Image: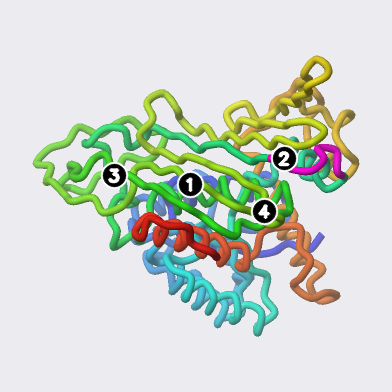
Amino acid sequence: MRTIRTAVIGAGFMGSSHIEALKRIGGIDIVMIACDDESQAKNLANRYSIPKISTDWRGAIDNEEVEVIHNCTPNVLHFDINKAAILAGKHVISEKPLTINSDQSMELVKLAQEKGLVNVVNFNYRFYPIIQHTQGMLEQGEVGKIYLIHGHYLQDWLYYATDYNWRLETEISGDSRAMADIGSHWCDLVQFITGLKIRKVFADLVTIHKTRKRPACAVETFKGKEQTELTDAREISIRTEDAGSVLIEFDDGVKGVFTVSQISAGRKNRLWFEINGSKKSIAWDQEEPNKLWIGYREKANEELMKDPSLLSKDSRKYAHYPGGHPEGYPDGPKNLFTNVYDFIRTLKDQRVENTDFPTFSDGLWANRVVDAILMSHKEQKWIEL
């Protein structure tokens, strides 16, 4: 197996998540990590035996050894880094959102197609074993005609007005927060599973904390870390949504609704959906990712546990452990990156199309959905994509 050399730009939560997943795959040599925080870059490099660091993201792109760039930076940097990487002839795996607006994403889609480079957006929830199996169920018609799609994505890491993260600042994160950050995951997941595209939206968004406390030292409190004690905090105005609900219409007139929130106490990362069909209903909760609820009218409901022997043939490869051995969040990126790097190794023999991973085109569509949601909220009417 050919070893592929790669670099990771960004040393925060997602940067470390990408590195950990890559280290589990094999056949990948992480030769550099780039981050403007030298201390943070050194800590990650030492932990994962990465030989080089750079305090400038251009250092990773200019490195001739590097074939693939993982872009794990704040949203406002996505466009410049992704574009520079493509122009340098590098394949790109980008965090979402692909960029902070549709125009930028469209430019990247066209550029990647022109250059014939592999382009990926990290919609990692697609790659749970149960999700792959569920997608196959829908594709084979096991759920029947879809009647309704509904769900939510709820978190509490920004519950208090004293919670701070760069995502709260529009200049860094973009015009949308909860919808772009987690709503995009929910929308991508249900569209992937059902094969239906969102065509119309009617949104109602809310900002609970109109102002928040930003530490003077700009200490960030990332997901999973305890609140840092604030000293000399200053008040900042918040212009992005804490939560919102969206009525949606898919292809074929299928209706749906979902709610997202980053201020729901007790909900840590609850991405949940339910699909009601003419033959059965199915529901899945990301916080309990190894089981699928299956509902019936005429008989007792069922619960499918993740077990390679019970999954469909196509989804079995995503389940790496026997039944009863749980697989979770870190396994999604690992499965996605495995597909991507296997594809790169055979790229000389095929075009970058019909991939088994989400591309920049999926990132562009996610941008358009969020753009439509923002416009709908502003104008208080249905918006067609």
Residue at x-position 71% and y-position 40%: 147
For mark 2, give the secondary structure. Answer: helix
For mark 1, give the secondary structure. Answer: strand
Quadrant including the N terminus = bottom right
Main secondary structure of the magenta stretch: loop
User: Which marked residue is nearer to the observer: mark 1 or mark 2?
Assistant: 1
Extent of the magenta region: 141-147
Q: Do the residues bearing badges 4 and 1 touch, measured as CB atoms within 8 Å?
A: no
| 286 versus 127 height, above or below | above
Q: Do the residues bearing badges 2 and 3 touch, measured as CB atoms within 8 Å?
A: no
Local crowd at mark 4 within 10 Å, few (<14), some, or many (≥20)? some
Instruction: Residue 28 in the image: state x and y as whole percent.
Output: 68, 57
User: Which marked residue is nearer to the observer: mark 3 or mark 4?
Assistant: 4
For marks 1 and 3, the one nearer the N-term is 3
Residue 311 picture quarter? top right
Instruction: Residue 12 in the image: state x and y as whole percent.
Output: 42, 49
Three-letter code, disc 2? Ile
Three-letter code, disc 3? Thr
User: Which marked residue is nearer to the observer: mark 4 or mark 1?
Assistant: 4
Q: CA distance from mark 3 to mark 4?
A: 30 Å
Foreground residue among 371 and 339: 371
For marks 4 and 1, the one nearer the N-term is 1
Foreground residue among 349 and 192: 192
- Residue 131, labelled with which disc? 2
Q: CA distance from mark 2 to mark 3?
A: 32 Å
| 43 versus 82 height, above or below | above
Q: Is residue 130 visible?
A: yes
Quadrant including the C terminus = bottom right
For marks 1 and 2, the one nearer the N-term is 2
Q: Which residue is mark 4?
A: 253
Q: Which residue is mark 1?
A: 246
Local crowd at mark 1 within 10 Å, few (<14), some, or many (≥20)? many
